Amino acid sequence: MKKSIEIAAHIFFWIVFTLFVFMLSKIYLQADPNAPFSQNLVYVVFLEVVMGMIFFYLTFFGLVWTKNKPFKLLVLLMGLVALLLLFAYPATRVGRWEVVSSILPHTIVIFLAGIFRKFSDSIKLEQEKQSLQLQNTKNELALLKMQISPHFLFNTLNNIDYLILHDTEKASNSISKLADILRYMVYDVEKEKIPLWKELKYIEDYIGLIRLRTSGPDYLKYALSGNPAHLQIAPMLFFPLIENAYKHASSKEGSEVIQINISIKESRICFVAENEYDKSVLNNHPGSTGLGMNIVRRRLAMLYPKMHSLKVTEGNSRYMLELTIQLDEF
C-alpha cells in the first residue's frame, strides 16, 4: 500500500511537470518565433521532460548510493553540476538569459528529487518499523502463551495431586480432561484465532477440573448464552481470568463463591468473572494476581486494540471483572 502511494506520487509529479513544461515552452516559442525548434513544440517538451528525468532519477537513486558517504556525495554533486553545464552549453550561443533559463529548472528538479528521496525513505522506514513491530508482537504473543501454559499446568497439577489422595476416580477424570486441554494448548494455542465454540468447550472442561476440587457443584456457577458458531477468538484469553477467580477466592467452600457468565450477542462477547475475596489477604501478597492479569491486558492491547473494554470492580467482599470484546466473524 505504501509503495503504491509512492508510485502514484511519481506519476502525478511527471504529469504536472509535463504540463508545466508544455505551457512554458509554448509561451516562450510564441514570444520568440525565431528560436530553435520553434515549429516543433512536441519535440521541445519531450526533450525537456527527458532531461528532467535524467536529473531527477540520477539524484533520486544517487542519494541512496551516497548515503552516509561524503566522498560519494561529492562525486554525485560534481556529476550533476557537469551535466547542468553540458545541457546549458548550447544556450551560451544564444544569450545569458537562455543559459540561466536552462540551468534553473533542472536545479529545481534536482531539489525536488531530494524531497522525493526523503519521502521515499520515510515510507521505507515506516514499513520497516511496522514489520519490526509485527514481528515483536508475534514474539511477545508466543512468550505470553508460554507463560500461560506453565501457570495453567501448575494449578491443575495441584488439583490432581489433591484428588489422588482423596478420590482416585475423580483424579482419573481430571487427568483425562487435562490431557484434552493440553492437546488443545499444543495444537491450537499457536494459532492466532480459533473458533469460539472450541474455546468455550475447553473453558467448560477447565471449569470441570476446578469443580472436582470444590465442596459442591454450586461452588462455581457457570452460565453461557448466545450463539458462538460464527465467531472466532484468540485462544486461551479467558483461562487466566478463571484461574485468578479460583486462586484468589477467599473460601473453598460455599455456594456461588465464584460466578462465571459468558454472553454472546451478534459479534460481541461479554465475559464476567466474580468471586468472593479477602482484600487483606491480597494486600499481604502484593503482585500475587499480577501475572495472569498482565498477560490478559497485554494480549488484549495487541490483539484487540480499541475493540475491547476491561472493567474491574472491587467491593467489600466481592471482586468482579467484566471483559467485553468485539470479535471477528468467519
Image (cartoon, rainbow, N blue to C red):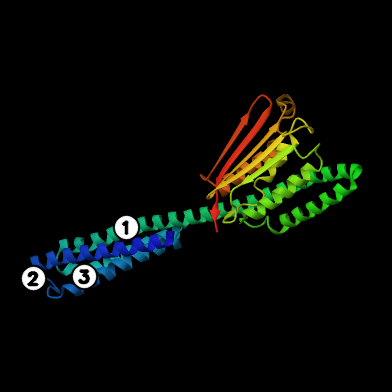
* Residue ID for mark 1: 112
Mark 1 and mark 2 residues within 8 Å of each other at the beta carbon: no
Mark 1 and mark 3 residues within 8 Å of each other at the beta carbon: no
Vertical position of residue 114 compared to residue 169: above or below: below
Image location (x, y in percent) of residue 172: 86, 51
Instruction: First in sequence, mark 1 or 3: give its number.
Output: 3
Q: How far apart are the two marked residues, 1 and 3, measured between alpha carbons?
A: 19 Å
In the rendered image, the quadrant that contains the C terminus is bottom right
> Observer-nearest residue: 184 or 217?
217
* Residue ID for mark 3: 45
Amino acid on which the number 2 mark rests in the picture: Pro
Instruction: First in sequence, mark 1 or 2: give its number.
Output: 2
Residue drawn where x is 28% and y is 66% of the image: 52
Task: Judge from the rendering whether residue 41 lies leftward or rightward of residue 82; answer left or right.
Answer: left
Label 2, residues with CA under 10 Å away: few <14, some 14-19, many ≥20: few
Task: Judge from the rendering whether residue 230 lies leftward or rightward of residue 38; answer left or right.
Answer: right
Q: How far apart are the two marked residues, 3 and 2, measured between alpha carbons?
A: 16 Å
Task: Judge from the rendering whether residue 247 lies leftward or rightward of residue 48; answer left or right.
Answer: right
Label 1, residues with CA under 10 Å away: few <14, some 14-19, many ≥20: some
Amino acid on which the number 3 mark rests in the picture: Val
> Observer-nearest residue: 186 or 89?
186
> Observer-nearest residue: 244 or 5?
244
Amino acid on which the number 1 mark rests in the picture: Leu
Residue drawn where x is 19% and y is 68% of the image: 91
Mark 3 and mark 2 residues within 8 Å of each other at the beta carbon: no
* Residue ID for mark 2: 33
In the rendered image, the quadrant that contains the N terminus is bottom left
